């Protein structure tokens, strides 16, 4: 196993170097490329740590969608970047920032070094109860049965972030089309690419979502792939994002968390507690929640990357 | 040397190779060059993941590679669009000239 | 039969690894973005393709095999598309590099104006001077397009 150890040490050094470079480089675009590369390396690290669920999320979120989000932000910052690069923060600001960073790092280091060894784990308990949830993937069981409340809050956080992005819109564009506007040639190579890639990508996204019940995968990863494919089609000029004032869009955005909350509180009547599932119905209910959350997540993630409304709504 | 050992060695070799390519990210000089190094790391990372997944018989790793292949392509396209629209009228450039 | 398939795997995976080696060497050693792109696409298409080909006998039919082939097809499609787009960006954006590629006929000033420049660093002087001659001809059409677009705003 010395080979595996060498690979692990190499990966660790590489990812540290990449992180340092991403922070140190001053050009925003170069820094975003560094971040995307960092996400790729992190995916490999999670696989080496035998956490394929996390690796899948990192591959979908860290490299793909977050990369696109940051690139969009960097493109918008371009006009102000050269101006901001000429001014230097004062010595006091820089000293304060250094002290603050050092303090956070020290606190993290102390926490990590003081972790109990062996670490306390609930993994055996989670595995023992797996049968009662009906799902085969322990990660899905944790997310939607043992800790369903956390997953609900996560979905709501994504929606709140979207509301936050929308609130940056100009008054005149409120409820209008998000900024993402394609300049691509409808007969160009990008349109061809999107035409071939998107249908296959949608199948892969649904597959990753479906397989999540028993193997690594799930709604977040599947929704990320579907959102990326949607953005690809829009970026290629083959489709347009709807104005954010559309009723169907807002209904779909709230539907997922709403179904989750209704099923969760129904547990008070049918089972003994909130977010408890009645015996034997755990798997169908988990599936219902996942299917309801799917459109919400796809829409919310795609609209987050698209940004605030920029153009006038219809009428 | 057994088959899994060979595949693991190949995985490590490919990883070392594409990691060396990251020097291009440091040197640039243009963002396009950096993007190339990132793309090479993407392809090499997918190859390394597949070799690793088959060697250790971890089926889920193949799904990770599949997701990575899709999203890496998406990120590359988003990136090239990002750097090539300073004024937004470059639609003709994507036509084969 | 098992032995033959294993030998096939070993040969194909080693060939794939060689293309990754070649791709990295090309990416590091070639003098300008277009030649580096050439090296990159070889590693992308052939390197990953040969690794996938070599792994096929070791995977379970049908789902894993289909997934592996799909991954390679994704990489091919993405590599071809992104390669074209990156070449466009390199020609237009990396004006400092492209400028030296053009024949010195005096009509090429547009390309060095800021309109066509992307955010990035200036290439090292040593890199732009080592351009192989065959790329001079390849870039002639770009010159004419640049003139068509009129004065930069």
Image (cartoon, coloured by chain):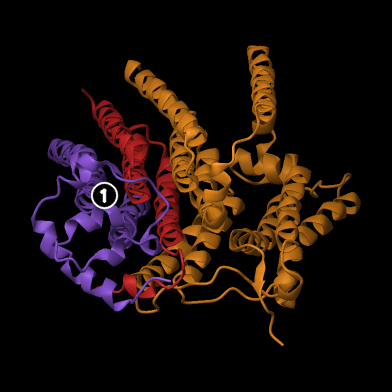
Residue displayed at 68% across by 23% down? A104
- Relative vertical location of residue C53 with respect to residue C145 in this rendering, above or below: above
Residue found at the far right of this picture? A269
Tell me, yes or no, if residue A93 can be seen here.
yes
Residue found at the far front of this picture? C106
Residue displayed at 40% across by 56% down? C118
Query: What residue is disc 1 on?
Result: C44
**In which quadrant of the rendered view does residue B74 lie?**
bottom left
Tell whether A76 sits left or right of C110: right
Front one among C65 and B44: B44
Residue B16, given in percent of the width and then of the height, sits at 29, 30
Front one among C7 and C84: C84
Residue A121, given in percent of the width and then of the height, sits at 67, 23
Q: What hue represents chain A?
A: orange
Residue found at the far left of this picture? C133
Residue displayed at 14% across by 38% down? C11
Crowd rating for badge 1 (residues with CA inside 10 Å; few <14, some 14–19, many 20+): many
Tell whether C30 sits left or right of B58: left
Q: Which chain is red?
A: B
Q: Chain of mark 1?
A: C
Local SS, label 1: helix
Q: What hue represents chain C?
A: purple
Tell whether A278 sits left or right of B47: right
Residue displayed at 46% across by 77% down? A238
**In which quadrant of the rendered view does residue C136 lie?**
bottom left
Tell whether C94 sits left or right of C5: right
């Amino acid at each position: 196993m010395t080979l595996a150890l060498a690979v692990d040490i190499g990966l660790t050094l590489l990812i540290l170097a990449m992180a340092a470079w991403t922070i140190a480089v001053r050009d925003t675009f170069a820094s975003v490329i560094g971040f995307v590369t960092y996400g790729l390396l992190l995916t490999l690290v999670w696989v080496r740590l035998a956490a394929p669920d996390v690796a899948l999320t990192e591959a979908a979120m860290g490299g793909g969608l977050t990369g696109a989000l940051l690139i969009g932000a960097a493109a918008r910052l371009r006009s102000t970047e050269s101006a901001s690069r000429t001014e230097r923060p004062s010595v006091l600001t820089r000293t304060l920032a250094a002290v603050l960073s050092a303090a956070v790092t020290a606190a993290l280091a102390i926490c990590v070094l003081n972790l109990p060894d062996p670490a306390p784990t609930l993994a055996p308990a989670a595995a023992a109860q797996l049968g009662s949830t009906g799902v085969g993937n322990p990660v899905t069981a944790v997310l939607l049965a043992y800790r369903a409340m956390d997953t609900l809050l996560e979905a709501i956080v994504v929606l709140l972030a979207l509301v936050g992005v929308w609130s940056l819109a100009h008054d005149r564009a409120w409820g209008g089309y998000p900024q993402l506007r394609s300049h691509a040639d409808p007969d160009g190579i990008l349109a061809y690419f999107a035409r071939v890639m998107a249908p296959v990508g949608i199948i892969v996204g649904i597959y990753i979502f479906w397989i999540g019940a028993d193997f690594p995968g799930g709604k977040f990863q599947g929704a990320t792939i579907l959102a990326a494919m949607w953005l690809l089609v829009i970026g290629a000029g083959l489709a347009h994002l709807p104005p954010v004032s559309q009723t169907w869009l807002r209904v779909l955005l709230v539907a997922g968390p709403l179904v989750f909350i209704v099923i969760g509180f129904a547990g008070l009547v049918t089972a003994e507690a909130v977010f408890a599932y009645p015996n034997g119905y755990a798997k169908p209910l988990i599936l219902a929640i996942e299917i309801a959350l799917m459109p919400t997540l796809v829409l919310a993630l795609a609209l987050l990357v698209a940004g605030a409304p920029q153009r006038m709504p219809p009428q | 040397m057994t088959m899994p050992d060979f595949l693991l060695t190949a995985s490590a070799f490919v990883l070392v190779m594409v990691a060396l390519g990251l020097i291009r990210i440091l040197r640039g000089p243009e963002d396009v060059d950096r993007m190339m190094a990132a793309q090479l790391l993407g392809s090499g990372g997918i190859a390394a993941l597949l070799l690793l997944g088959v060697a250790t018989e971890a089926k889920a790793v193949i799904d990770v590679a599949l997701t990575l292949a899709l999203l890496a392509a998406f990120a590359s396209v988003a990136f090239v669009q990002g750097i090539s629209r300073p004024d937004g009228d470059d639609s003709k450039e994507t036509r084969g000239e | 039969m098992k032995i033959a398939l294993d030998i096939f795997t070993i040969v194909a995976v080693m060939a794939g690894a060689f293309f990754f080696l070649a791709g990295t060497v090309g990416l590091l050693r070639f003098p300008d973005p277009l030649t580096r792109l050439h090296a990159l696409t070889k590693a992308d298409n052939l390197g990953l393709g040969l690794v996938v080909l070599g792994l096929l006998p070791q995977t379970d039919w049908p789902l894993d095999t289909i997934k592996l082939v799909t991954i390679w097809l994704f990489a091919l499609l993405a590599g071809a598309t992104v390669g074209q787009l990156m070449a466009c960006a390199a020609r237009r954006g990396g004006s400092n590099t492209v400028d030296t590629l053009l024949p010195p006929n005096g009509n090429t000033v547009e390309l060095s104006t800021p309109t066509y420049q992307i955010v990035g660093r200036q290439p090292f002087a040593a890199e732009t001077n080592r351009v192989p001659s065959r790329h001079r001809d390849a870039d002639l059409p770009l010159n004419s397009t640049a003139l068509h677009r009129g004065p930069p705003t």
